[in-house]
Image (cartoon, grey):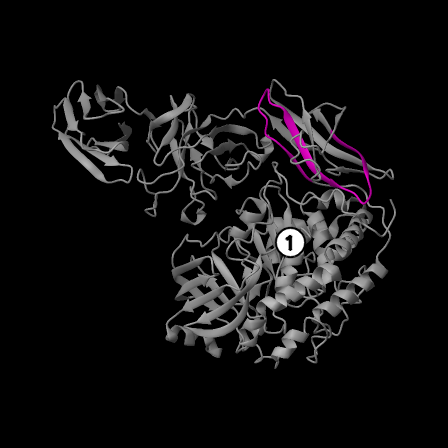
Amino acid sequence: MKAKLFPAVFWALVSFPGILFSQVPFPDNGQVYVQDVVPRVDIIIPPVSLAVILDPANAFSDDLWQATFIFDNGTLRDTVDNIGFRLRGGQYSRTAQKKSFKVSFNTFVPGRSWHGLEKLNLNGEHNDPTISRARICWGLLREMKVPAPRANHVELYINGNYYGLYANVEHIDEEFAGLRFGNKSGNLYKCLWPADLAYLGDDPDLYKLESGGRRVYELHTNEAEDDYSGLAHFIDVLNNTPLDNLACELEQVFNVDTYLRAIAFDVLSGNWDGPLYNKNNFFLYHNESTGLIEYIPYDLDNTLGVDYLGVDWALQNIYSWAHPVEPRPLYTRILAVPEYRGRYSYYLGRYMQEVFTEGLLFPDFDAVRSLIAPYVEGDPFHSLDYGFAYSDFLAGFDGPLPWGHTPYGLKSYVATRRNSALAQLETVDVKPIIRAIANNSPNEGQDISITAEVEDDGGLVSIMACSRLSGQVDYQCMEMYDDGLHADGAAGDGRYGALLPALNETAVIEYHIEAIDNTGQENRRPLCEDRSLFVGSASVPLAINEIMPSNSTVIADEAGQYDDWLEIYNYGDAPVYLGGRFLSDNEDNPTRWAFPEIWIQAGEFLLIWADDDENQGSLHTNFKLDADGEFIGVFDTADNGYARIDGLAFSQLQEDQAWGRLPDGTGAFQAVSPTPGASNEPLSAVRKKEGYAQEWQVFPNPFDEILHIRFEEGTPAPVHLYLRDALGREMLKSRVEKGGKEAVLSTSGLAPGLYFLCLNFGTGQVLTLKLNCL
């Protein structure tokens, strides 16, 4: 349907679960980024340290100084000791009178986070008389479904002195990636001027070029590997693929759809200090779940009418918006593809109806101004860099100010930009937009679900999931539905699903999605190649052998912390390489945590700490286990379609309760005695241990007044016995001398509940049994 009006039908409001698109990329604001109050942040720091930080001679130092952080939003009040504190930002921020600051929670306490955050960015916004452009733009990106930082305002005090109103902007790091994309082990590149993504050659090291003493494409994760091959390949595809094949190739390495929305944001908001005009200020993340490069915006103070280049951004043509003479392949090459240009036009039109309108934005502007006005009026640094008065703050939301770089106020810019963009907007009949394709990981005998988000500017006539067994020629196509009955989420939410009949044997299925709208426009995704899914469990002899999702006293990790843990067991007769395989607590996102590149020997028990703290070592995951019950699984390599090797869905488990297989590797799960890194044992039974020919028993269980520990043939060495309660407190202890056959513990004075009996055989072997007292 040809029109310049773009109704909201079929717009996906959430991100949907599936192998490749399972993470919700827009986490809640939570307590830290609450929107309706202005939290107070206090920094308590030795005056000598603060003087060093603020000394102009140290303006470009990244040295962190110890301090205390206090946060108070009226509901939450937290104090965090031993944080790191320093200046942050580029040249203009560090030399401004109103400084910007970095707060680090994990510098002096490695592995620590606060409300899931390792860092905070407190930005002075010294060039913006409203101190609001960045916060407003981060909110716009959220509305436009572009993964971006959360932000609000805070009042900052240092040693009791008011330093003014600050923008509190979420730090972009591996934690940010984990929240948005469901994984955080991919390469994250910070791209600053002159990051134009121009092709320099095939050698990845060519993209390690420097400017101003830092890399243009600065790697912020996996620094030891220093691998730029993925970035180099993306730039090669972007610049050198023939135009008629660019969509096919680019969509295999880059999330094009999200970036088209980001272009629309840049053009509407006037974000000239990003990649399109100033080749500056963005991140690229290699999403390990999808294999695609993700675009992440960065630094949005030069927006909504701010200008230093003599360009009227409210009137700049939306189809020739990038730099006119320098290469900007991220804009020119992408919009040279007719389908992408049409989709970009469609997004612009939608946003100018549903997001970027006077009726929606002006009340928001007024609300922000009213919320922060008392804090700006007393801000002692607001006026120091440009001479802004409090009246400039108030007027800056409405119209221009006489400061050269503020030819528009927020409202006057939005009105002018929207009117000019609507006049420039091309009439489009957009092809159906298909994205976020996903499937489950079915075993033999399980239904196969395929889902996708589908959107169009008019009506959709047909959406089909077309599949075939690998090696076959013909496809079988099944209608997809948005009715809540086909693994598609809620009815009418823009996500469509199809359920394929179960297969009774292992197989590889190839599939794609086809859609037709009411004007006959057709589309398919993937565009040129099918996706593959593996049916059945991979024949790899690895098992989740034992789990403990609430470890309080049983075993501590290398850092002395009692974290969740699980045990992987190789029940085969040969070593298994773990590199390229994955562990996940979400069956729809099998690549959540990648095993290290190590071997697990035949018969070996490998202990994994599920503590969401990868900084503590290679066997620490990026998620925790839920003691209330959830799924946990091991998944095969990408070449094998991330097939499930082993997995279980467990119910609620109590504190220090272990759940394991008996026998190891192949048996059914049941309550077991905690034996991390060793063979599983029932809670109480006749036992035989390596090095001990005799049998021993613990009974009864549950116990009441008497507990027996019996060694049928006598102990070959003294055995120390300790009975501890669920909090780890020692309640009873005893000793069986060499040759002794039994210990009897009087337990009549113990309160009912959970207890642990530890047997120390004096050979480095300590066994723990879980017992219940009546």
158 inside magenta stretch: no
> From the viewer's perspective, is residue 177 above or below residue 385?
above
Q: Quarter of the image for the C terminus: give it.
A: top left
Left or right: residue 694 compared with residue 612 = left
Whether residue 226 appears in this view of the structure is no
Which of these two is toward me, 187 or 112?
112
Region in magenta = 436-465
Q: Of helix, strand and loop, which one carries label 1?
A: helix
Left or right: residue 332 compared with residue 686 = right
Left or right: residue 6 compared with residue 752 = right
Q: Position of residue 459 (x, y in %)?
A: 82, 40
442 inside magenta stretch: yes
Whether residue 651 appears in this view of the structure is yes
Q: Position of residue 555 (x, y in %)?
A: 32, 39
Please identify the quarter of the rendering in which residue 355 is found.
bottom right
Which of these two is toward me, 346 or 364?
364
| Magenta residues, dominant SS class | strand
Q: Position of residue 132 (x, y in %)?
A: 62, 67
Mark 1 crowd level (few <14, some 14–19, many ≥20, 10 Å Cα): some
Please identify the quarter of the rendering in which residue 351 is found.
bottom right
For image coordinates 28% across by 28% down, the residue present is 772
Which of these two is toward me, 123 or 678?
123
Counting labels gives: 1
Q: Quarter of the image for the N terminus: give it.
A: top right
Left or right: residue 579 compared with residue 745 = right
> From the viewer's perspective, is residue 744 above or below residue 397?
above
**Amino acid type assigned to the residue bearing label 1 in the image:** Arg
Q: Position of residue 629 (x, y in %)?
A: 46, 33
Quickly name the residue at label 1.
142
